[in-house]
Image (cartoon, rainbow, N blue to C red):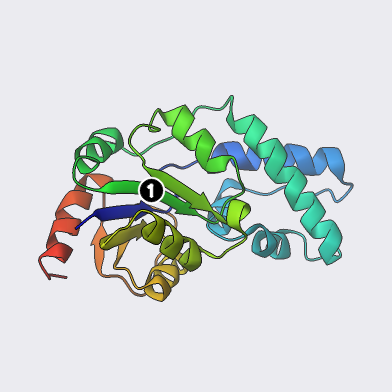
Amino acid sequence: MKKGILFDLDGTLWDSSGAVIESWNNTIAKHTSLGLTFTQEQMRSYMGKTLEQIGDLMFPMLPPDERLRLMRICSDEENEFLKTAEPYIYPNEKETLERLSKDYLLAVVSNCQDGYIQIFLEKCGFGGLFGDFECAGRTGLGKAENIRLVAERNGLGKCFYLGDTEMDSEAARSAGVPFIHAAYGFGSPSAFDARIGSISDLAKAVASLENGNK
């Protein structure tokens, strides 16, 4: 039986919030007269949501069409900015992923814009470790639907989803896959099948779930 581990991205595989908020603040200043700036902590609270949801939180004063137009500009300029930024990945991440990739298909499933996952894979040098990825920006689907899509097209008989937020927990539950909470990330979901304090603990958590333990 083919098995997989699917990953959220922000707060789970890397923390790009510092570079992202710098890019977004620059874009907002360049393209608007709103006089708004946002903090890294605010950006961390937005990550994991769709562009539409983030726009509702950041720019409620704008009409919906203008809000989405600005969000798309921010996302496009963010992708270009991240190509020159230094990524922050979590301790022992590469070694953990290398070990897991021998027994599981690894894939990223995120609510991000198209191009964002590709930058992560290239900047961190992880392209050879992940067998697939999907995002809302490519499919227009929610995270649960994209989890099912990746599992189905790779013929996964069993898979797990690692994420850090309530939305990740809900998506995994909706997709019918066990959810592992990355407690080192940005959120505190109310329900999970396992919890890890470091990505180094992922192999142990997956093995425990496979053996029927919680």
Whether 10 is drawn above or below 162: the answer is above
| Along the viewing direction, whichever of 213 and 131 lies nearer the viewer | 131
Hey, which quadrant is residue 163 in on the image? bottom left
Q: Identify the residue position indicated by label 1 in the image.
A: 107
> Which residue lies at the image location 20% right of the left edge and 40% below the top edge?
102
The residue positioned 30% from the left and 70% from the top of the image is 192
Vertical relation: 81 (above or below) 202: above
> Residue lying furthest left in this view?
211
Which element carries disc 1, helix, strand or loop?
Answer: strand
Residue 84 appears at what percent x and percent y?
59, 24
Instruction: Count the labels in the image.
Output: 1
Q: Is residue 43 left or right of residue 158?
A: right
Which amino acid is tagged 1?
A: Ala
Looking at the image, can residue 136 be seen?
yes
Quarter-wise, where is residue 139 in the image? bottom right
Q: At x 56% / y 39%, what residue is drawn?
A: 18
Q: Is residue 175 left or right of residue 200?
A: right
Quadrant of image for the N terminus: bottom left
Q: Where is residue 32 in the image (x, y as percent from the top left)?
A: 87, 46
Measuring 66% from the left and 31% from the top, which residue is drawn there?
80
Q: Can residue 10 be seen in this view?
A: no
Mark 1, residues whose alpha carbon is within 10 Å: few (<14), some, or many (≥20)?
A: many
The extreme top residue here reads: 84
Q: In this view, does 191 lie above or below 22?
A: below
Q: Which residue lies furthest to the right in this view?
A: 33
Q: Quadrant location of the C terminus? A: bottom left
Residue 45: x and y in percent read: 55, 58
Residue 158, position as x, y percentages in the image: 25, 63
